Amino acid sequence: MPDSQKPLFSRPVLAAIMVFSTLAIWVLNLTAPNSKLPTPAIETWASSSGIPVIWLTQDQWKKSNKLELRLVFHAPTTNPQLTKTTLAILMSDSLPLSTASINQRLSPLAAKVGSDYNNENQTIGITLSNEPRYLKPTLSVITEWLKKPEFKTRTFERLLHRKMHGESERHQLEQSLFTNNNTQQSTALSVAQVQAYYHSLKAHSAAIFIIGPMNQDIQKTVKGMIDKISEDFQPSTQTNKVASHEAASATTKQGKGSLWQTRNAIALTPLTNVKDWISLQLWGTDLVQSLNKQEDVDFTQLNLTLSQQHPWAWWNIQHSNALLVEQASTKNSNKTLKAKDLISVEQLPSANNKDTFNALLDTFKKQLEQQTLSPTWWSYIATQVTYKDGPLTLQNFADGYKEAIDTYTQDDYKTAIQRLLKVSSYQEIQVYQ
């Protein structure tokens, strides 16, 4: 054979090159950096009164001075308005012999407090500095405040007048979505009820979370103060069993005139893994973006309540001026999406369009890389997404969330959304004016 017609490599050499090339590509894919997400470290112990304490930190926080403290309770909740009022008064001027709010007292110490609750849990949150000049005085004020708060009659009456003219939209949607024979209708409250409910909180302490960096000296100080704060707390023996079930799907109309607002709610299946949580984040983003593109929508607000037993989602749609919508509709023949369309996998854009899904996932990954550097974000995950006696614990989340996001696919998304959204429970309240 002439030299010009001879192959450059013999067959054995060519086969070896192909094998090594395949292996090289495989190794590169295996070792290529995926999402830039930190892996937190978690340590647990119990307070002197037996309350579980969970501390989460990460290397990126070594030079930070921010600590997040979360006290989580599972008190029986039969009257949401009582829970709301108790926490509101606690966040007001409840320090003994003080007319200043608790946050006014804490502001010079670079600290603040807040509270949250859902249909199953109640949370008191404290943001503070770990610098010794701030830490000890802050913890002293917090200890005095939580051990013997003063629920003042004047504050109670002021909040009652301001906050209790009717059920909030959240409570209205929750009542339309869930049927709970133990739930009390709005009744007149008293300071005595508020005091009793606060004692009920302390008798149903689920866990205490510390998020942020602590050296040995700071740990010793924080552990000692947690023991003092929680010395009259009692561990919650079990998760408060909420005897609720979802109502049948319904649409309700209120008022007359033009459609002004639509309020929507849907029951969810409890989360079992990190991919369930990712799926709901993507679905929520797609829902809001899709609705905001509609001509008759000004804006949409979505809330996910990821409680352990009865999670649910609710969103408000603020509608545009009817005349402007009619004028715009004559110029645009695109299909209109309604809220109910977006709880169906068959019509959900991100479930049916690969580009839409990939764009949502890429944006979510970038946001997550920033969020996971925040102690406040981890505090949210610890208290509102994961549960120490559930299938998705904080440890499970911290250990597995990076792999979950790196291996997440559109098929994972479709499967999860079909299972997580309880379509038969969908509630819609149309408000006209």
Image (tube, grey):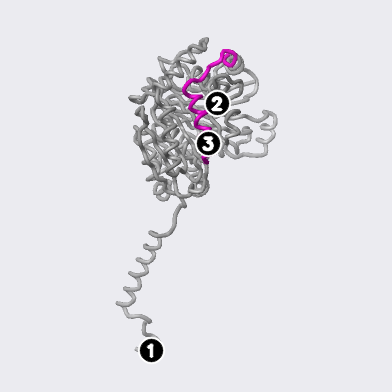
The amino acid type of the residue labelled 2 equals Arg
Judged from this view, the residue extending furthest toward the bottom is 2
Q: Which amino acid does label 1 sit on?
A: Asp
Where residue 370 sits in the image (x, y, percent)? 52, 47
Magenta region includes residue 139: yes
Give how far across and how far down residue 287 sits, in percent. 52, 37
Q: What is the CA distance from the residue labelled 2 to the residue labelled 1?
A: 80 Å
Secondary structure, magenta segment, majority class? helix
Q: Which of labels 1 and 3 is toward the front? A: 3
Nearer the observer: mark 2 or 1; the answer is 2
Which contiguous range is marked in magenta? 131-156
Residue 11 or residue 46, whichever sits in front: 46
Query: Which residue is denoted by mark 1 in the rendering?
Result: 3
Sequence-wise first label, 2 or 1? 1
The quadrant of the picture occupied by the N terminus is bottom left
Question: Residue shown at 63%/18% (left/top)?
Answer: 256
236 left or right, relative to 373 = left
Q: Quarter-wise, where is residue 54 in the image?
A: top left
Q: Which of 172 and 12 is in front in this view?
A: 172
> Badges 1 and 3: C-beta atoms under 8 Å apart?
no
At label 3, which amino acid type do we have? Leu
Q: Is mark 3 on a helix, strand or loop?
A: strand
- Residue 395: say if magenta: no
